Image (cartoon, rainbow, N blue to C red):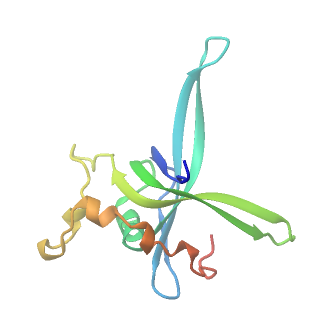
Amino acid sequence: MSGSVNRVILIGRLGKDPEVRYTAEGTAVANFSLATDESFTDRAGDKQTRTEWHRIVAWKRLAEVCGEYLAKGKLVYIEGTIRTRKWNDQNGTERKSFDIVASQMRMLSSNGNGAKAKVESAKPASETKTSQQAAQVSEADNPFEADNSDVPF
């Protein structure tokens, strides 16, 4: 196999409300944490749960949708890629972070009345997109490689 794959699929709950900011060029970027749980039985026969926290970054229209419709505790499906960031902290120590750059998001929690939350419900019919179209950002549209030094995260 000569190719490689960098694809992540997560289903979990938001640890906090998404934080949406804009770059100097006006590009939206959203950051939020997502918790995934794993249940298992230990050697003593006791049930255990392990929680992993993931840092999610969304760009452009997907970032705006996340900021508008997601909230702490909501169950979501995230698909994207793993990106490594390196930087030096205030003491000059090299630090590393592993982020999930989201390319797709699906809201899995209901909106309180038993129905699944829908992206298109907040827009006039002339501007309506399906939730899949509104929540999807292509890899080619991802400005992650661009100079985003003005976005503090």
Q: Residue at x 54, y 47 (%)?
A: 1
Q: Quadrant of residue 41?
A: top right
Q: Residue at x 47, y 46 (%)?
A: 10
112, above or below 83, in the image: above
140, above or below 73, in the image: below
Give left or right: position of 88 versus 74: right
Residue 128 in percent (x, y) is at 18, 70
Give left or right: position of 31 versus 61: right
Residue placed most toward the observer, 14 or 23: 23
The residue sitting at the top extreme is 45
Residue 28 in percent (x, y) is at 45, 76
Q: Residue at x 60, y 82 (%)?
A: 147
Give left or right: position of 90 versus 130: right
The residue sitting at the left extreme is 125
Residue placed most toward the observer, 76 or 5: 5
In the picture, the quarter occupied by the C terminus is bottom right
Q: Quadrant of residue 33?
A: bottom right
Q: Residue at x 33, y 46 (%)?
A: 108
Total numbered circles: 0
Residue 92 in percent (x, y) is at 86, 71
